[in-house]
């Protein structure tokens, strides 16, 4: 037997022994592949409307079947998180055909802001390319102004000297009104000082999709203003 063969056999035996000596608890603790996110049992504020739009029994109460159907719709339309919750973004997406009827389709790329539903999306002609996503517009007394505007100034790390606060991914389209990211919940009352507040991921996506000169169309009325 050659020296090389003896060395290889000894190495193989050592590996086998080490494998046998691995504690069973370690094997059992090995991480499994990531499972899909669980459905939420929570009934959403637009439960009945979403159920009706998806052809489900519109009883206004969340069920396992409801959640699976809603989650499937969310996954197919890029709505995050896809947890089966019947919230404003999902309802806004289901109503998008009617909502987008208020946004121009003959100006190329345009960011649409529906104040009534508190959602925004970007479309190119009549084709939606991002969203809809939840937003927070101006509070009572600081309403986000409606109408057709253009992005005229962009600042990725803007700081508001007026309110002494960071405004990441700012894209100004009407005076001091801009799309920008905020920390915390965008659904918390009472609203912004006129800007269109967004989750960081959505504001970052808007930053990559919009450019100076692109159109922004704001319409509707925020509830409570």
Image (spheres, rainbow, N blue to C red):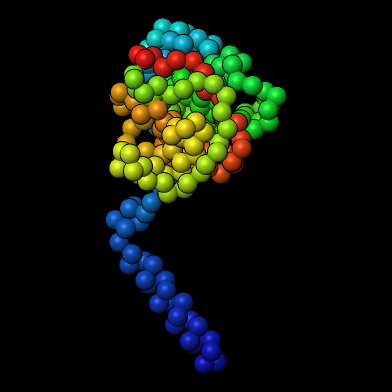
Pick the residue in front: 94 or 209. Answer: 209
Inspect this view and state whether residue 61 appears. Answer: yes
Q: The C terminus lies in which quarter of the figure?
A: top left
Q: Is residue 48 above or below residue 210?
A: above
Query: Is residue 63 visible to us here?
Result: no
Q: Is residue 44 above or below residue 29?
A: above
Q: Which x, y percent locates residue 194?
A: 40, 28
Q: Nearer the viewer, residue 12 or 104?
A: 104
Q: Is residue 211 above or below residue 95?
A: below
Q: Foreground residue, 134 or 156? A: 156
- Residue at 46%, 22% (x, y): give it: 145
Give whichever of 82, 203 is nearer the camera.
203
Quadrant containing the N terminus in the rendered view: bottom right
**What residue appears at the point 47 percent right and 48 percent down from the top-left corner?**
156
Residue that appears at 37% across and 71% down: 18
Residue 9 position in % (x across, y down): 48, 81
Picture quarter containing residue 41? top left
Q: Position of residue 179 (x, y in %)?
A: 46, 35
Report x, y in % for residue 107. 68, 28
Residue shown at 56% from the left, 17% from the top:
99
The mark tally for this picture is: 0
């Amino acid at each position: 037997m050659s020296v090389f063969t003896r060395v290889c056999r000894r190495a193989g035996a050592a590996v086998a022994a080490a494998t046998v000596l691995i504690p069973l608890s370690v094997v059992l603790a090995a991480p499994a592949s990531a499972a899909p996110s669980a459905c939420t049992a929570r009934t959403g504020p637009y439960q009945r409307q979403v159920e009706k739009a998806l052809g489900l029994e519109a009883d206004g109460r969340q069920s396992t079947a409801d959640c699976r159907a809603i989650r499937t719709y969310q996954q197919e339309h890029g709505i995050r998180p896809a947890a089966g919750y019947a919230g404003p973004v999902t309802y806004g997406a289901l109503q998008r055909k009617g909502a987008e009827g208020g946004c121009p389709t003959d100006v190329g790329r345009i960011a649409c802001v529906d104040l009534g539903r508190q959602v925004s999306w970007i479309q190119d002609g009549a084709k939606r390319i991002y969203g809809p996503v939840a937003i927070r517009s101006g509070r009572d007394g600081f309403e986000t102004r409606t109408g057709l505007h253009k992005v005229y100034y962009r600042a990725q790390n803007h700081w508001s000297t007026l309110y002494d606060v960071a405004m990441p991914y700012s894209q100004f389209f009407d005076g001091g009104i801009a799309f920008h990211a905020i920390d915390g919940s965008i659904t918390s009352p009472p609203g912004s000082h006129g800007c269109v507040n967004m989750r960081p991921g959505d504001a970052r996506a808007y930053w990559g999709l919009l450019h100076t000169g692109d159109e922004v169309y704001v319409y509707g009325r925020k509830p409570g203003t």
